[in-house]
Amino acid sequence: MKASSNIPEDTMWEATVACNPEYDGKFFYAIKTTGIFCRPSCRSKTPKSQNVSFFSNAVKAQNAGYRPCKRCRPELKSKHYDPFELIIEDTKEIIDHHYWQNIHLNDMAVKVGVSRFHLNRIFKNRTGYTPRMYLEKTRVKKAKELLLTTTLNSTEIGYHVGYQSISSFYNAFKRSTGLSPSQFKVNHMEPPAY
């Protein structure tokens, strides 16, 4: 390790190991084996101390040949970058673009680079929903659109939005809207124009 900041080297190392956000913007650490530099709060795997260099700012790390981490985005000016925000956005994007598929929490967690437990916890803390609840909400929203804009029946719509059984579709729809799909359609259809 080499020091490039007025913060003691052992303090920088402790902040790195603890992923301490209080030191974000005060120093950056770079990993020789990967060629990447990070913020102290980055949740990536803790590197070996002999492979770490410290820098007082992102420009110095880049000038030394290191690339910014894609997880913690140390090149961004914001001192308080929230790495969890990107995880939440990526998870929502996976669900929004693949809601009709059989999506498993493990698969989403692998794609966004965290454990399933961690993903479930931070997603719920930030959105008020678990990823599974958000998936259900997305499917029901799409089902409501299809009920009002297509001639598909409720069974076809249930399968179309990703439910494996009609009973699970009806239960999710009723839980979300308080109505069955057919009741929802009757209550929300525009009366015919004469």
Image (cartoon, helix red, strand yellow):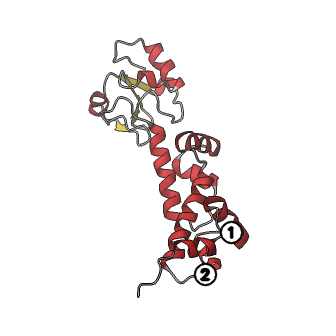
Q: Position of residue 137 (x, y in %)?
A: 57, 58
Residue at horizontal 62%, vertical 59%? Answer: 176
* Quadrant assignment, res 168: bottom right
The CA span between labels 2 and 1 is 12 Å
Where residue 111 sits: x, y (%)?
53, 52
The circle drawn on residue 1 is none
Q: Is residue 20 left or right of residue 156?
A: left
Is 146 located above or below residue 13 in the figure?
below
Q: In the displayed image of the protein, which residue is found farthest to the front? A: 194
For mark 2, what is the residue?
153
Q: Which residue is mark 1?
A: 170
Along the polypeptide, which appears first: circle 2 or circle 1? 2
The image shows residue 107, relative to residue 114, as above or below, that is below
Q: Label 2 neighbourhood size at 10 Å, few (<14), some (14-19), many (20+)?
A: few
The x and y percentages for residue 68 are: 36, 38
In the image, what residue type sits under mark 2? Asn
